[in-house]
Amino acid sequence: MKRILITGGTGFIGSHTVSCLLEKGFDLCIVDSLINSSKKSLERVKEILKKKNIDINEKINFFKGDLRDKSFIDSLFKSSAKEGKPIDGVIHFAGLKAVAESVVDPIKYWDNNVIGSFNLIKSMNENNCKTIVFSSSATVYGNNSDQLISESSNINTINPYGSTKLVVENLLNDIQDKNSRKWKIAILRYFNPIGAHHSGLIGENPLEKPNNVFPLIINAAYEKDRLKVFGNDWPTHDGTCIRDYIHVMDLAEAHITAIDYLFKNNNQLINLNIGTGKGYSVLDLIKTFEKVNNVEVPFIFSNRRDGDSCKLVANNLKAKQILNWNPLRSLEDMCRDGWRWKQMNPKGYF
C-alpha cells in the first residue's frame, strides 16, 4: 500500500482524514507542529480503528515539526526512502485558518501558510514526490455574486487568509504549467466543515480561542455564554451570512477519493469545490442546532467582521463527476455529531 505524508494531521480535518486513510490501509507519515492541535487525536483514531479490529501500529508514524524548517521536511523524505517505503504522495492540511486573525496579523499567516507550503513543495520536487492534494478554501472567491460558486467563478480574495491560499494555488499552477508531464495535483476548495466523527471520539479542538462559528455555537450552548453573530444587515433572507456547511467526514472522504484519483490517473491539475451545494444562514444553523439537540444557543448581534463574505455556496458538480464523490450527511447530522463530541469531551482532548 502507498505511503502518504499528511501535514497538519492531528488537526480537525487532518485527524478525520487520517482515520479514513488508515481504514483504507494506507501507510501514513503524519506531521504537525501541535501549535493548535493535540497528538491525543491520534490516540483516539487508534481507538476508533481498534473497535473495527483494524491494526494500524505499523502504519501510523508521527513527527512533530514545522514546515518552515525545510531540513525537517527533507529528513522525512530521506528517512522514508532509506526504509524502502518512499513517500508516494502528500495531503497538505497544515496552516493557520482564522479569517479574523489573518486580518489582524497578516505577517503571521504569510509566514506560516506560504513559507511552509513553499518548503514542502520544494522538498517534494527535490525528492521526486510529485502527487499532492492541497487544502485550499472557498475564501479565494471572496464576495462573489454567483448564486452557486463554480471553479470558474471569479477569484477575489478579501482577506489575508484567502490570499495565502491563493498564492499556494498559483505556485502549484505554475509548477504544473512548467512540469505538466510530472505532477499530479488536486486543489480542494473547502466550504465550511463542521460536525465530528459519529463516535464522538474525535472532533474540533482548537487550543486557542475558536474563530469559526460552529465551535462558538457549541460553546454557547454548553456554557450558556452568548454567541456573537457578526452582522444582521447582510442582504440575505434573515440578515445573517450564508454558508455551505459540510460534514467533516464527507470532507475527509473527499480527500481519499482525490488522492486515489491522482494515483490512478495521468498527470494533471484539478481544482474542485468541496461543499454540499446548499446554503444556510448563521441563524438557520443556530435554529437547526437547537432543534436537533434540544438545547438553547444564546446569542446577540454584533457588527460585521472585517474580511467576511455575505454568501458562499458551492457548485460541487465537478467534484461529483470527477471523483465520483457525494456528500452524504445532512445539516442535522453535523449538528448532532458536533454536540455529541462536546458532551463526551467538554474540555476537548484534555
Image (tube, helix red, strand yellow):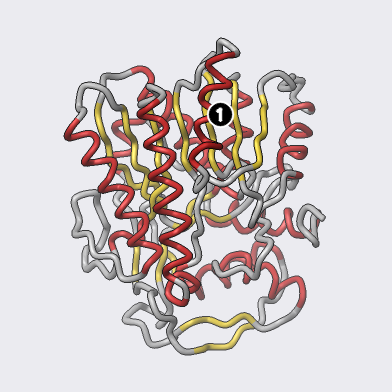
Q: Position of residue 127 (x, y in %)?
A: 41, 24
Please provide percent x and percent y for residue 126.
Answer: 37, 27
Is residue 194 shown left or right of residue 266? Answer: right
Closest to the observer, 279 or 55: 55
Q: Quadrant of residue 171?
A: top left
Closer-to-camera residue (231/110): 110
Would you say residue 308 is visible in this rendering? yes
**Residue drawn at (53%, 40%), measured in percent from left and top?**
7
Image quadrant where one finds the C terminus: bottom right
Q: Position of residue 53 (x, y in %)?
A: 77, 20
Q: At 21% across and 28% down in the image, what residue appears?
A: 179
Q: Is residue 290 visible in the rendered structure shown here?
A: no
* Quadrant in the picture for the N terminus: top right
**Residue lying at the far top of the rendered structure:** 84
Amino acid type of the residue tagged 1 in the rendering: Leu
Which residue corresponds to the image point at 51% horizontal and 75% vertical from the top-left? 283
Residue beneath label 1, please? 76
Q: Is residue 291 above or below residue 39?
A: below
Residue shown at the point (39%, 53%) measured from the top left:
114
Question: Of residues 189 and 75, which is closer to you in this image?
Answer: 75
